[in-house]
């Protein structure tokens, strides 16, 4: 691997390295879907999988289950609805609220998508040693960060309780 200044930064570069890896994975996924002639975005699998499991959810319910911001879910479902993968149902008690379900197009496309996602899982697993604890460590990092974020930890180290 060629010289990488961010790697030199150690823990200071952690967020940059995670973002850089995420961006690379999303970009590669976008290229893959385009090459396969598919009109989906790499992060849409989250909504497909969520609605397959729960059948019908509001934006707020999706955001809560995924730990995503409300605006990012609105953007994602808006694009998916425009592409014909989601069907919106107006809430009977609150006209501002909509619930989403998978459309017929989504249901028809899911077997192909799931085959690709399964291959993606297998390909990703091969990035790690058989005895890797990466996913466990990542979960631990997420839990610890949710309990005390970067700002709080840094200010604590500076003596600002």
Image: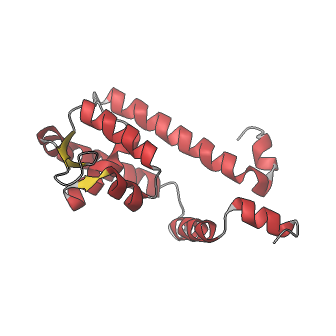
Q: Quadrant of the C terminus?
A: bottom right
Q: Is residue 56 left or right of residue 118?
A: left
Residue 86 in picture, x, y percent from top left: 22, 41
Residue 51 in picture, x, y percent from top left: 24, 54
Query: Farthest right residue?
Result: 159
Q: Is residue 119 above or below residue 109?
A: below
Q: Quadrant of the N terminus?
A: top right
Q: Which residue shows up at 19% across the image and 46% down it?
A: 90
Q: Nearer the viewer, residue 134 or 89?
A: 89
Quarter of the view holding residue 41? top left
Q: Is residue 43 left or right of residue 106?
A: right
Quarter of the view holding residue 144? bottom right
Residue 91 in picture, x, y percent from top left: 20, 51
Q: Which residue shows up at 32% across the image and 41% down it?
A: 77
Q: Nearer the viewer, residue 151 or 102?
A: 151
Q: Which residue shows up at 23% across the image and 61% down it?
A: 53
**Which colour scheme appears in the figure?**
secondary structure
Q: Is residue 155 above or below residue 37?
A: below
- Give the total of numbered labels: 0
């Amino acid at each position: 691997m060629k010289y990488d200044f961010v790697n030199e930064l150690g823990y200071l570069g952690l967020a940059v390295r995670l973002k850089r890896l995420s961006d690379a994975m999303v970009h590669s996924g976008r290229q893959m879907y385009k090459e396969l002639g598919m009109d989906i975005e790499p992060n849409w699998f989250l909504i497909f999988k969520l609605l397959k499991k729960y059948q019908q959810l509001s934006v707020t319910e999706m955001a809560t289950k995924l730990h995503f911001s409300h605006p990012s879910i609105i953007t994602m479902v808006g694009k998916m609805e425009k592409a014909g993968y989601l069907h919106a149902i107006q809430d009977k008690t609150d006209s501002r609220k909509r619930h989403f379900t998978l459309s017929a197009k989504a249901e028809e496309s899911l077997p192909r998508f799931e085959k690709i996602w399964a291959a993606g899982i297998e390909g990703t697993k091969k990035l790690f040693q058989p005895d890797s604890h990466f996913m466990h460590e990542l979960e631990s990092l997420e839990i610890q960060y949710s309990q005390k974020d970067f700002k709080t930890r840094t200010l604590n180290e500076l003596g600002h309780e």
